[in-house]
Image (spheres, rainbow, N blue to C red):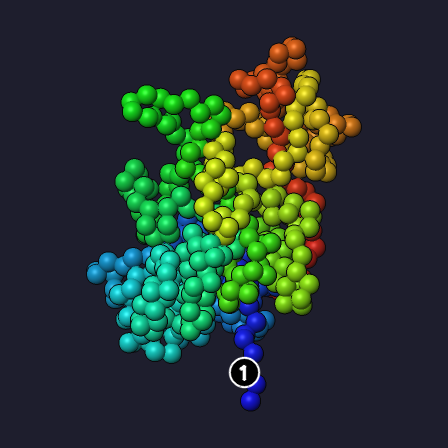
Amino acid sequence: MPPAASPAPELLAPAGDMECVKAAVANGADAVFFGLSRFNARMRAENFTLENLPAVVEFLHTRGVKAYVTLNVLVFTDELSDAIAELQALADCGADAVIIQDVGLAEIARRMFPDLRVHASTQMTITSPEGVRFAESLGIKQVVLARELSLRELEKFPPSVPLETFVHGALCVAYSGQCLTSEALGRRSANRGECAQACRMPYELIVDGTLRDLGDKRYLLSPQDLAAVNEIPALIERGVRSFKIEGRLKSPEYVAAVTSVYRKAIDNALAGAPHLASADDWYRLEMTFSRGLFSGWMHGVNHQELVGARYGKKRGAYVGRVVGTGKDNVCIDNPEVPLKAGDGVVFDTGGNTEHEQGGRIFSINGNRLFFERGKLACRTSPQAHACGKPATLPSTATCATRSLAISRDFKKTSPPSISS
């Protein structure tokens, strides 16, 4: 008999609320992962409750989509009874898998709920074949590998258990499950779903007691976002069976755009027609949310590319440089992306991003963008500081942060048949 065909790769999309669930389903997700109101690593998301859990699972199952529920934090002893109650609820409602960080809880799930499929969270920090084998000994059926693994390292992993890897979204400055910065600085533990994102803050570099001048590089611990859409064929070749999109704190527009781009990439790869992401695909990935997009550790370690250090929050697509200003308007030199009235832009001067300027475009005349009266504090002298910032005009970059067209497309592609 010929060997059994390998199962088709799975596209796993995030959901922080019901609108994100619908966006994932409408744009081709094979499975959706989401959390409940306790014991999940994204406590700031809207999340779901034990009461509406059965309805969410039924919604997904009736549309042929799997439901994965996160229970991916460390659990204290006095919380075990509540955590077990959640496991019971997941088993009762027919959830397809529970994603777990705590190895003790994984053992409890194996013993008490043998029919409930357990996946190892990336919070377990599994970075080696030995880690995968340990997870297997706990009865774990699928392993979410650490984001820090390269394509070369992935070749060494055994095919005995399905492997899952993140392909898009935010990257942590530390190995997932190992960062204690938030807890140390703000008493908010990332391992309890309360990360304060200390890595997104500006820092100074002091070497041997002396402040090092880094110019406009202030966000020294803030990685760009992962975008491995062009690495999908290589990941399939290495036996990865589940492609995970980060983003349970993101908008439905983000879920829709990113899921659709990766759906196309996976389908093309399976059809033997892999291709690089188009300019339109890349624009959609940038515009729905990005701090800059990079392939992460897929091709090895490159810290200088991974951390651009100019900003630590959403940027979107690069538009161009400011070459002139007027009353409530700026002139952009050869815009690299199409802009329309209603789109949002921000002016990046390399300064403190908490005080940068930008906003919705009121109207456009050629390369000149007009804004609401009084919105911008710009000066027009030959050495004007762009929008009141300590940078000369040619050094001020403009980035698009919101696309009205993408928002409209999202509404058009949400089928009325997909309703709660």
Quadrant hosting residue 207: top left
SS at mark 1?
loop
Q: Nearer the viewer, residue 108 or 36?
A: 108
* Image-based side of 189 in relation to 235, left or right: left
Quadrant hosting residue 118: bottom left
* Residue depicted at x 37% and y 38%: 198
Tag 1: amino acid:
Pro
Disc 1: CA contacts within 10 A as few (<14), some (14-19) or many (>=20) = few
Q: Nearer the viewer, residue 249 or 28?
A: 28
* Image-based side of 138 in relation to 335, left or right: left
Q: Nearer the viewer, residue 167 or 328?
A: 167
Look at the picture and state if 138 lies above or below 153: below
Figure quadrant of the C terminus:
bottom right
Residue 376 on image: x %, y %? 61, 22
Residue 204 on image: x %, y %? 38, 27
Q: Which residue is mark 1?
A: 3
* Image-based side of 269 in relation to 295, left or right: right
Q: Nearer the viewer, residue 200 or 63?
A: 200
